[in-house]
Amino acid sequence: MSSSREQLAKVRAPFRVLAGFIFVLSLFAILATVTFAFTEPYDHIIWLLGIVTFGMSYISGHVVFTGYAPKFLLFTHGAKDGL
């Protein structure tokens, strides 16, 4: 089922504030991951940390700046009319 953005309700303000907090934390996590990648011996956990932190920052940043979840998560939104 595909819904357009006109049919979906935006994310409410408290959740956007929470997403903003997660976005800021994920930016710090990206810096920590980059530092970890340069200072520690190579390990495969760096790839996992990078994927998780970039994923967190992408999703939370998208919610903060647009008010909607990314396209692959639009099923999580409710309808504007509440149905």
Image (cartoon, rainbow, N blue to C red):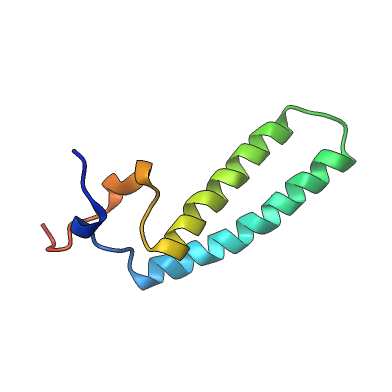
In the image, is residue 47 above or below residue 69?
A: above
Q: Is residue 75 left or right of residue 30?
A: left
Q: Is residue 63 left or right of residue 30?
A: left
x then y, percent, for residue 59: 48, 51
Corner quadrant of residue 22? bottom right
x then y, percent, for residue 75: 27, 45
Quadrant position of the N terminus in the picture: top left
Q: Is residue 32 left or right of residue 80?
A: right
Corner quadrant of residue 83? bottom left
x then y, percent, for residue 42: 83, 29
Number of residue marks: 0
Q: Is residue 28 left or right of residue 76?
A: right
Residue in the image at 13% along x and 62% along y: 82
Residue in the image at 62% along x and 55% along y: 26
Residue in the image at 68% along x and 52% along y: 29
Residue in the image at 26% along x and 55% along y: 5
In the image, is residue 12 above or below residue 49?
A: below
Corner quadrant of residue 73? top left
x then y, percent, for residue 23: 56, 60
